[in-house]
Amino acid sequence: MLGSANETKVSASLSYSDYGHAVIAAVANPFSAAILTGGAAEVFRRRMAGAEFTDIACELTRLYPDHAGEILSDIRDVESYLLDSAPGGRPLGAEGGGGGDITAVIRFAREHGLFTNATVEVLTKCNLRCAHCFHPDHSGAGPDIGALETLFGNLRRSGALFLCLTGGEIFLRRDAAEIIDAAHSAGFIIELKTNGTRLDKKTIGRLARNRISDVQVSVYGVSDGANAFTGGHYDFTAVASAIEGLREAGVPCSVSYQLTPGNVTEMERAYEVLSRLTDNLFFSFYVTPRLGDPQGNALSRIGYDQLRDYVLPRLRAWGMAPDTPSPYRTKDCGYICWAGHEQAFFAVDGKVYPCPDLRIPIGDLSHAPAEEIVRNRFDALKRIMPTTLPACEGCSYFDFCDSCIGIALAENGTFHRPSPHKCDITRLQFEGGS
């Protein structure tokens, strides 16, 4: 069935979803993903069901004697794959005709209409009041854990393998660790987004037992004290302790430093401090428009000239220059935007959107379960997606830029004019790409 997994399973060291014609599997730490098709997928299924490789070889060569060589090759591939994914093994490579990274998985899922990624907003409550935040409301407590467990089960049955939990600040929830445990038990590869101020050693110890691919810690300064950007006292000591604790516990962690006009000249100091804490640091200058007030956080955006003349040279010097984008769409793919194809965003109020930026609902959990919404998502997308972007299609970057129709709609009230901020970022990627 299009976009649905016939079977989803996990083992101690990996998780996967079986879509019938293909298996998508992944390991959380170190993260890697793979697509298994054809004979490799069949071998993988039988091995996951408990069959030994020797028995698989005997059975499949008996059934398909003319393909014995291919079957043995597939068995070697899968055996290597499972050894690599075991604790202490090497990162997964491209096995069974598939790609060995998330980019290849996303591309494959889009091309085949497979639902693989879900982002779930577990609350909007936050202890910071960041100037760039797209949320106007910081008080939403979110659904109870029972509702989230039901949602997780529905999403796994729909084929989702990758789950991002976000907020608000997720660790303001007293049951945050239980929520993450539930996501692990459901079989997800889990990504978390946090500001790091409420992440203590006990919680980090719980995280280390789960299938976490990344804890993305957003950082807004590298000193304690009053912070105009976060709207109050900023406890960088707590954030640094969380980053160090994650590293010591072996939990994958990335650090995002948000650049704005007010702190851009401090990025060298931020690099100096943060690069001692992590080797997975990046600088973000993308600002999503505030819900209901798209100009409310516009002053948090850095202009193109400053990005090009100040930010980019430093990123180049640190080996962090943006990659030149690969093609996002082709002129005959039939889609302006891929949002909602392999992914969906489940907001704290139960509304379901194609992505966090495109705020036109494709469903509501108060009216239908997630499985039904995911199954019918393409019908909903046909009703809301534009078929052309006249103002963008003459641009030389059009096939490589996602055009972010969600941000365009939020800022302009229409799909037909692009977001200048998005244009600036795409232009920077091309002119400064590595």
Image: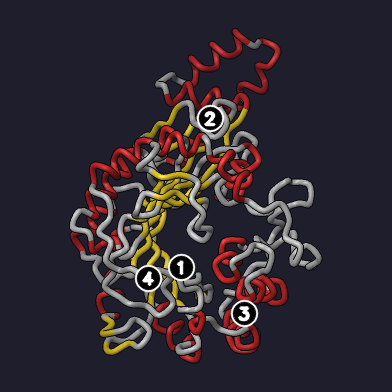
In the image, is 6 to the left or to the right of 392?
A: left
Viewer-side residue, 282 vs 145:
145
Which residue is tagged 2?
A: 19
Which residue is tagged 4?
A: 136
Which residue is tagged 1?
A: 280
SS class, disc 2: loop
Q: In which quarter of the image is the N terminus?
A: top right
SS class, disc 1: loop
Identity, as a three-letter code, of the amino acid under mark 3: Arg
SS class, disc 3: helix
Dot placed on the residue nearer the N-terminal end, 3 or 1: 1
Identity, as a three-letter code, of the amino acid under mark 1: Asn
Which residue is tagged 3?
A: 316
Mark 4–mark 2 Cα distance, whole angstroms, equals: 39 Å
Label 4 packing within 10 angstroms: few (<14), some (14-19), many (20+): few
Label 1 packing within 10 angstroms: few (<14), some (14-19), many (20+): few
